[in-house]
Amino acid sequence: MTLPKHSHLDARADLNEADVVISGREGEAAGVKAVLVSLQRAWKQMGLARTAATLFRLNQRHGFDCPGCAWPEEPGGRKLAEFCENGAKAVAEEATKRTLDPEFFARHSVADLADRPEYWLSQQGRITHPMVLRPGDTHYRPITWDESYRVIADHLNALDHPDQAVFYTSGRTSNEAAFLYQLLVRSFGTNNLPDCSNMCHESSGTALTESIGIGKGSVSVLDLEHADCILIAGQNPGTNHPRMLSVLEKAKANGAKIIAVNPLPEAGLMRFKDPQKVHGVVGHGVSIADEFVQIRLGGDMALFAGLGRLLLEADEKAGAASSVLDREFIDAHCAGFDEYAAQTRAVDLDTVTEATGVPRAQLERVAQMLIDSERTVFCWAMGLTQHRHAVATIGEATNVLLMRGMIGKPGAGVCPVRGHSNVQGDRTMGIWERMPAAFHDALDARFGITTPRKDGFDTVDAIRAMRDKRAKTFIGMGGNFVSASPDTEVTEAALRGCELTVQISTKLNRSHVVHGRTALILPTLGRTDRDIQLSGKQLVSVEDSMSVVHLSQGRLRPAGDELRSEVAIVCQLARTVLGADHPVPWESFIANYDVIRDAIADVVPGCADYNTKVRQPDGFQLPHPPRDSREFHTATGKANFSVNPLEWVPVPPGRLVLQTLRSHDQYNTTIYGLDDRYRGVKGGRRVVFVNPTDIAALGIHDGARVDLVSEFTGADGTMQERHAKDFLVVPFSTPVGNAAAYYPETNPLVPLDHTAAKSNTPVSKAVVIRLEPAAGTSWDG
Ligand SMILES: Nc1nc2c(c(=O)[nH]1)N[C@H]1C(S)=C(S)[C@@H](COP(=O)(O)OP(=O)(O)OC[C@H]3O[C@@H](n4cnc5c(=O)[nH]c(N)nc54)[C@H](O)[C@@H]3O)O[C@H]1N2
Ligand SMILES: Nc1nc2c(c(=O)[nH]1)N[C@H]1C(S)=C(S)[C@@H](COP(=O)(O)OP(=O)(O)OC[C@H]3O[C@@H](n4cnc5c(=O)[nH]c(N)nc54)[C@H](O)[C@@H]3O)O[C@H]1N2
Ligand SMILES: [Mo]
């Protein structure tokens, strides 16, 4: 396979990456440096007045919800500025004063833009006008809103079947817009609602639904603060959920022990300085992890199975009076324990050591910490969800909690830490290709419509459908489908094969320049922008990672008069596509978002009285039967122990297993800058972190320039190769055989068909690669 010349996939296009510098890593996360870095960014993008107007309203009761991540605000007295470096960067990125108007598009052809790196695209500013690219055109041109709705309606209504259209959602969309968007899509006649969650926490939802009957976390911030043991696996909170660190610090002050399970010694897991506190400005900060378990990629299932075995053994040893297992809980609330215990007693601890790389003594220490703890929380993110055996891994982690009765009591439970600020809310509102029948029934009854019941496409299936021309229209409600999805070349070809691609966006990204025959860009308001409709200023609502729903209100002057709210875009599009006699009162929704919330109250479980409850000072928490009353709405009516054959990720000889992850200076596909302070990288992103032992074994040296070649055996048994060119080798503390490099530069290496069992999530954390000398170099060059 030869890689076509794509300069956006090449190393040095426009970026001066030759200047990348590897220096000392910062000893701790956050601290005063974080405040300085974020203020610099904020001033540069927003200027003084907007900086003052935004950073102080971040996550405040009358402010807007931070578009950074889904970590909850602390209830009750919120700090004056719930400050976080990466939250501030996310705001600066959205509230930037830079704008990107029709003249910009007249200056830059689409071919020119397609040659630019993602970083450059995202730095150009907020999009100000609806733009169209007609077949044969070289440049996007302005178009009126009415005309753009007409173009979309003409395409959609000309399809042979509604299932030929794909409606993607990213996780920043408000509850109100998400509810209306799925209503539009289902009214049109399809469940093709793939979302970023398919690539993110889908494995958590699948596993938890099987185990405890609901796919959401069971803890709140207070539970974490009062836990006495918190295990954090596959998550880098210092970069991706920085506000979690102050909660961990509080938990530690209350006596909690923290176990970090990660292949990398991530700065935020090791040391933390709270920028809100005096010791954050002086001194060395708090060390976070009491136990750092440096696990091999994909070793977590074996880790939890090994811990399960040690707990069972300890229970037997303690005899009749043992409190290691919570027998009462198991007997009253669980199913499948005997089968689980039988399998787990037979787990071979040498296999566990081989799969995890964790020494037996440490495994025993961690088991003892779990035994000693009365209140345990497990937190996790992409390090667990993006593996072939992700669902089984999360099931195995949940087993360990169930054994000890750690669900549905204060200070204990499961905590999948969500990514996008409203990804959980979007799901609650019906953004899912497989909503349960009861949800459809409620929609149908409320609006007098008949929604289709056949499951729709998730992200991977949507790419396959577009690739095979079974789908012809792509509409994206936010996000960057082209760059976030696996197998970049395949995904790009899939999008280019569409008749129409539409991106409803705040900022330019690669999905605007890799397009269908006709393409539209529709500029929309973000979280920080004020939203004024006929009835006055509008509020929207969002749900955080802990099921708390609350309001968000932006206050900034939008980047131009032509921007529309996501709600307005959906409703006007719906009217044009579905016609004047469609029974849903679309116009009434635009004028006053309370009307949308009244509909949500009638349709979405747990949302009765939505308009009132969401206006309570800290919003309201959605029901969660295991958390609230130890009820488990599973097939057995109980919490299920899951039993699966043990899987891990061996490293083939001469190869490395690569994880693709985030730097400290990006938000998913939006690149803020080229530094990764906490990992000691400055000025470039095409680096691959490799253990020094592997560097020596492969006969290369620090700073060698290499191509990454992924190897994957397809369903037909043939070996496929994929290439990503020109990366700099950086020695790093990662387990032998395991490497790491940044997403999205490495997405071309992730095979579309390599997905997690049951959740179909792309396996972004275990890509088998080999290293080859980059063009113009040799192994000693
Ligand atoms: N600033 C900022 N904030 C963000 C985002 C962002 O890009 N920038 N993205 C948001 C989104 S959408 C999400 S989903 C979250 C993502 O938050 P994270 O899940 O923290 O993101 P990743 O960078 O993918 O990091 C994965 C972590 O898991 C570890 N890991 C990888 N493989 C394994 C494994 O097999 N086992 C174990 N135990 N650990 C492993 C990695 O070393 C790394 O520390 O963050 C959200 N918040
Ligand atoms: N290899 C690899 N691939 C991955 C991952 C990985 O770890 N490794 N992580 C996966 C994960 S966890 C996720 S969540 C996905 C992320 O996938 P996406 O959510 O699709 O990607 P983002 O980069 O977050 O999308 C950014 C774009 O959203 C638009 N946007 C921002 N704010 C708004 C808004 O308020 N409204 C609208 N309409 N648009 C807005 C902007 O135009 C911006 O360019 O990527 C996945 N892909
Ligand atoms: Mo995510």
Image (cartoon, rainbow, N blue to C red):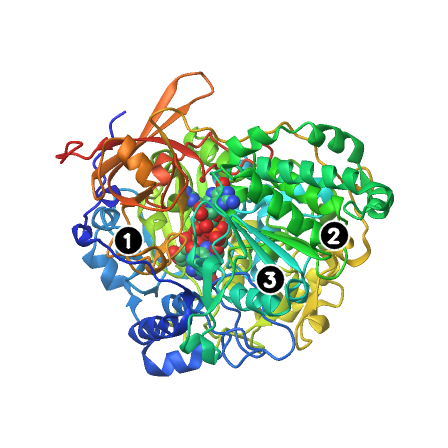
Report the mark closest to the observer, 1 or 3: 3
> Which residue does the numbered mark 1 point to in the structure image?
140
Report the mark closest to the observer, 1 or 2: 2
495 over 629 or under it: above or below: above
What amino acid is at disc 3? Asp
Residue at (20% x, 51% y) in the render: 17
> Which residue does the numbered mark 3 point to in the structure image?
544
Instruction: Give how far across and how far down residue 550 sits, in percent.
Output: 63, 69
- SS of the residue at dot 3? loop
What amino acid is at disc 1? Tyr
Asked whether residue 336 is in view, the answer is no
N-terminal of the pair, mark 1 or mark 2, is 1
N-terminal of the pair, mark 2 or mark 3, is 2
Report the mark closest to the observer, 2 or 3: 2
- Compute the Cα span from label 1 to label 3: 37 Å
N-terminal of the pair, mark 1 or mark 3, is 1
Q: Which mark is residue 407?
A: 2
Instruction: Give how far across and how far down residue 562 sits, in percent.
Output: 39, 68
Residue 690 relative to residue 201: left or right: left
Quadrant of residue 775 within the rendered picture: top left
